[in-house]
Image: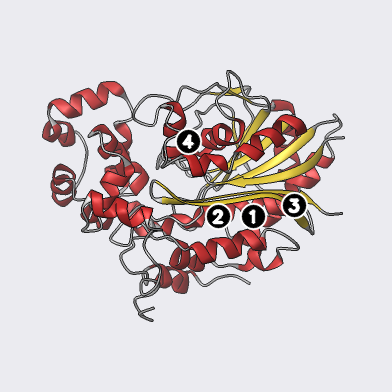
Amino acid sequence: MMTDIHQYLAELDDIPGTRVYTAARARKGYHLNQFCMSLMKPENRARWKADEAAYLADWPLTDDQRAAVLARDYNRLLDLGGNIYFLAKVFSTDGLSFVQAVSTMTGMSVADYQAMMLAGGRSPQGVRSIREGN
Amino acid sequence: MARITNGLATSHVPAIGVAMDLGKTDEPYWQPLFAGYDWTRQWLAQTKPDVIILVYNDHASAFDMKIIPTFAIGCGERFKPADEGWGPRPVPDVIGHPELAWHIAQSLILDEFDMTIINEMDVDHGLTVPLSACFGALPEWPAKVIPLAVNVVTYPPPTGNRCWALGEAIARAVASFPEDLNVQVWGTGGMSHQIQGPRAGLINREWDNRFLDGMVGDSDHLRRIPHIEYLRETGSEGIEMVMWLIMRGALGPATRALHRHYHVPASNTAVGHIILEPVT
């Protein structure tokens, strides 16, 4: 039986602390994610590191997206259509691991986040659904 | 005739590849994870698959936002390890099996699975980490590999039921290939992980282990798990587990487990690994 797309999408927005990479986000973040992808090339990484603002000027991003990239505000970038696998090109260029970069989105220090992971990770209890509060 | 002898599933966490490439596998953090692959390496050395159909997802390496294939099959002669932003992994090139890959691609299209055909692409950690974890560090991979890339990044990914049906169609395609080949299907990705947003770090050991339990036997209930359940219960990146169902679908009505391993954490992720054989 075909799933109703509106109901499907509404459920994706009902997960606490999570931005599912839907078509709406993919459209909003198209140039942002393609900018991130450009950092896969060593010569582009060198230009980016030399002058981030000048490099960004070549990309049709919104002012909010530019500011969030420069601030490395990853939660904001997710809201503005960024996808984590693309944003990873930015934090990898900064020399950060996934754990280091991901912890910045949780409000925890890297050490506290790593300790949580070693202790078995974050429990799903209470963070499954905004509506159900479970 | 070619035949599918076994299925294997494993997580494909990039940090596993980094730990191997930097010689850290004996460190206390990594040792318990790699211990779960010792059995696998011996078993693979004995069973000697000729070809592995390796189901994985690309992580913004070969595919960017320009083109997003839901199901894509690698029909090329060889695939190089991708530069994911810190240089390519120092692992061998992946050697394809164009004849079998094209046979599968043609058969799948006639069987109403409209595959994207890829002749050239680099393969990222999603494909090379399972090879490293399961074979170890080798000068060349001991089997040919047919990459089968699934979109699980941009929503919606394919449903679990569709993945299962694709696996069944792959099994039909392999069975009609005239050469005598020992073919394995590997499903990769998962288990619990979320690497974005304030909920990052979510791990659900109970759910993951129920999923591993479910891979054994008829597994029929697994094909009806909706996307939202993977996301709520196992984190936003837990959705990768739909790819395991392509492998499971390819094994037929019933399976038994030969080996199973579960470990938390590798970086942000719960690592699950299981080896299955069809029960006829």
Q: Secondary structure at mark 3?
A: helix
The label shown at residue B241 is: 2
| Residue type, mark 2 in image | Met
Chain label for disc 4: B
Q: Secondary structure at mark 2?
A: helix
Of callouts 3 and 4, the N-terminal one:
4
- Per the image, the residue denoted by label 3 is B168
> Alpha-carbon neighbours of circle 4 within 10 Å: few (<14), some, or many (≥20)?
many
The Cα–Cα distance between marks 3 and 4, rounded to whole angstroms, is: 26 Å
The Cα–Cα distance between marks 4 and 1, rounded to whole angstroms, is: 20 Å
Q: Is residue A14 above or below residue B38?
A: below
Chain label for disc 3: B
Question: Mark 2 and mark 3, same subunit?
Answer: yes
- Per the image, the residue denoted by label 1 is B245
The C terminus of chain B, quarter of image: bottom right
> Alpha-carbon neighbours of circle 1 within 10 Å: few (<14), some, or many (≥20)?
many
Residue B180 falls left or right of residue A40: right
- Per the image, the residue denoted by label 4 is B125
Q: Answer yes or no: do the residues labelled 1 and 2 have beta carbons within 8 Å?
A: yes
Observer able to see residue B28: yes
Q: Within the image, what quadrant is residue A47 found in?
A: top left
Q: Answer yes or no: do the residues labelled 3 and 4 have beta carbons within 8 Å?
A: no
Of callouts 4 and 1, the N-terminal one:
4
Residue B80 falls left or right of residue B245: left
| Residue type, mark 1 in image | Leu
The Cα–Cα distance between marks 1 and 2, rounded to whole angstroms, is: 7 Å
Q: Is residue B90 above or below residue B60?
A: above
Q: How was this image coloured?
A: secondary structure
| Residue type, mark 3 in image | Glu
Between tags 1 and 3, which lies in front?
1
